[in-house]
Image (cartoon, helix red, strand yellow):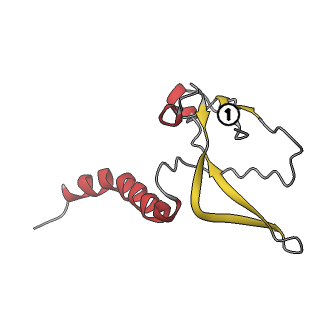
């Protein structure tokens, strides 16, 4: 298989049978990189480890590329946060994450609200 492996810096929930972090296909999403040749790239994702889990400000990530032939239009996209859910569920997961951050403030505020 030509999919890369993440040897260090991946979230443990994404450890595959190889013992390393394994990318998973994002169903229903792709990137067009060349409209003339109709080149469309499938998307794969992996969740990286969180620096805060280790008390550091960064994580070193080592990717083992497994291309057997030439690679064309390699694209890497990084974004903040862990997205363990399906991509189409991400907006809801992000909203729930924000609500969880606000709950302690809301609970504390209830101590001062008159009924």
Residue at image mark 1:
5
x 18%, y 55%: residue: 111
Q: Is residue 33 above or below residue 59?
A: below
Q: In this view, does 33 lie above or below 82?
A: below
Question: Going by the image, does 21 lie left or right of 12?
Answer: right
Q: In this view, does 10 lie above or below 111?
A: above
- Residue 53 percent across, percent down from the top left: 50, 30
Q: Residue furthest bottom?
A: 36
Q: In this view, does 33 lie above or below 6?
A: below
Quadrant of residue 1 within the rendered picture: top right
x 84%, y 74%: residue: 35
Question: Going by the image, does 90 lie left or right of 80?
Answer: left
- Residue 83 percent across, percent down from the top left: 51, 50
The residue lying toward the viewer, choosing from 113 and 92, is 92
Q: Which residue lies furthest to the left in this view?
A: 115
Which element is circle 1 on? strand
- Residue 64 percent across, percent down from the top left: 74, 31
Number of marks present in the image shown: 1
- Residue 98 percent across, percent down from the top left: 42, 58
The residue lying toward the viewer, choosing from 20 and 1, is 1
**Quarter placement of the C terminus:** bottom left
The residue lying toward the viewer, choosing from 110 and 46, is 46
Mark 1 packing: few (<14 Cα in 10 Å), some, or many (20+)?
Answer: many
x 89%, y 44%: residue: 70
């Amino acid at each position: 298989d030509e999919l890369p492996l993440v040897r260090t810096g991946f979230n443990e929930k994404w450890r595959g049978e190889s013992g390393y972090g394994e990318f998973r296909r994002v169903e229903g999403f792709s990137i067009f990189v060349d409209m003339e040749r109709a080149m469309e790239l499938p998307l794969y994702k992996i969740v990286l480890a969180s620096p805060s889990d280790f008390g550091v400000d960064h994580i070193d990530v080592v990717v083992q590329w497994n291309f057997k032939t030439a690679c064309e239009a390699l694209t890497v996209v990084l974004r903040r946060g862990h997205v363990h859910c399906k991509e189409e569920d991400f907006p809801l997961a992000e909203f729930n994450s924000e609500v969880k951050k606000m709950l302690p403030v809301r609970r504390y505020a209830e101590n001062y609200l008159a009924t």
